[in-house]
Image: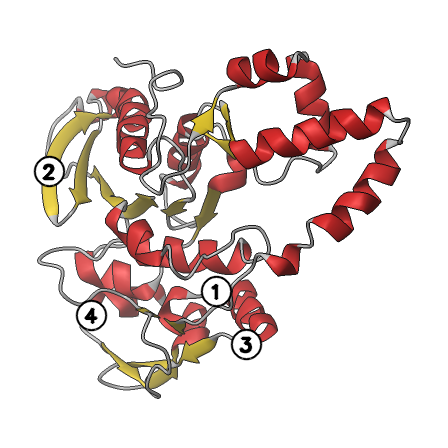
Amino acid sequence: MKNYKSEIPKDLGSGTQIFKMKEVIERLNVTPRTVRYYESEGLVGDVKRSLGFTRYFTESDINRLREVLTLKQKGYKISDIKEIFAERYPKNEVLDPLDVSIQDALLDANDLKKCAQYNVDVVKTELVFDHMTVSHTDWQNVQSTEFLKPFKMNNLNKPKNKTYISVPTNTASWTGCGHRAIAHYILNKRDEVSSITKNIPQYIDNLTEWFILPVEYSMDYRYLTDLEKSIIVEKRHHNVTESVILFESELERFLEKEIKDASLHSHRLVQQVLFQCDPKGPHYTWLTSLIHKSVPHKDILKIEPVFPAYRESVGTLHGSFLALF
């Protein structure tokens, strides 16, 4: 297996050169502990990390560290430097407006609050069943088995912006939760990431999605309880789908390798990992535990219930969905 912590390109494709901790401390003649301390105090900026917590610094990060060292030599305290940097590097100076429309089928209650806060255009959706019609925002009040039946998702208003994030409708098989991951990320990282709207096409291009389905045996066999359970896993990247059947004991190692390999598409700097699983399902505790083990960087991980569009696309209550970019 490749060493995912050490193998990383020097260029992220945007012309931004990045450096590891070893290079930074050699250039500044400081210890790793010093760099980590200034980062923890919020003086360095948005330092990127890989899934394995490896830090990657830009030239701008290094310049800010150099400024901190210079100010410390002049006798400034950390609190003084924070005040200086607050004026020198105001957050609102580097943020672009969220010129994006988002379908509410990709949003939870907290995301909707963020949309109101940032004045993001929301395309409202209704779920149309044979016997009832409900707003998508009320989907958790609907009996879960209803989502196994065919239903329609109708938009109640048109998107106002050219950039529109919605549930994909052109997939040949199951619908993955990747666009949901992107919508959640851009709303919750709004105050930290500059040019976030311009990055959306890149996020979509970097998407990798998985569908995970534990297989339930149904047969007359005396030793059925002794059989190891099987898991069907399907992965999709750039509309190419791969499938594999695993034993339960193989899933943890498989997921860990899959997530690390998929992070290559994001140059090892994964922005968001999203896992949707039924909290009332028999496999919830086990599967979420595996995901936590496979994603050590908890700041980028979100676990939540399965949204209606994804459940309807597979026709089962027991499937789970994973996505990262």
Quadrant of residue 183 within the rendered picture: bottom left
Q: CA distance from mark 4 to mark 1?
A: 22 Å
The answer to whether residue 177 is seen in the rendering is no
Badge 2 density bin: few <14, some 14–19, many ≥20, Cα 10 Å: few
Amino acid type, residue under disc 2 in the picture: Glu
Q: Residue at x 31, y 75 (%)?
A: 162
Q: Which residue is mark 4?
A: 149
Quadrant of residue 259 within the rendered picture: top left
Quadrant in which the C terminus is drawn: top left
Q: Which x, y percent locates residue 79?
A: 87, 38
Q: Earlier in the sequence, mark 3 or mark 2?
A: 3
Q: CA distance from mark 2 to mark 1?
A: 30 Å
Mark nearer the viewer, 4 or 1: 1
Q: Which residue is mark 2?
A: 242
Q: Earlier in the sequence, mark 4 or mark 1?
A: 1
What number is the disc on residue 58? none
Give the camera-side residue of 86 and 2.
86
Badge 1 density bin: few <14, some 14–19, many ≥20, Cα 10 Å: some
Q: Earlier in the sequence, mark 4 or mark 3?
A: 3
Asked if the residues shown at circle 4 and circle 1 are in contact, with their CB atoms under 8 angstroms apart, the answer is no
Mark nearer the viewer, 4 or 3: 3
Q: Which x, y percent locates residue 191?
A: 59, 56
What number is the disc on residue 108? 1
Give the answer, above or below, for where 80 lies relative to 70: below
Q: Earlier in the sequence, mark 4 or mark 2?
A: 4
Secondary structure under badge 2? strand
Secondary structure under badge 3? loop
Q: CA distance from mark 4 to mark 3?
A: 35 Å
How was the colour assigned to the protein in this rendering?
secondary structure
Q: Earlier in the sequence, mark 2 or mark 1?
A: 1
Amino acid type, residue under disc 4 in the picture: Lys
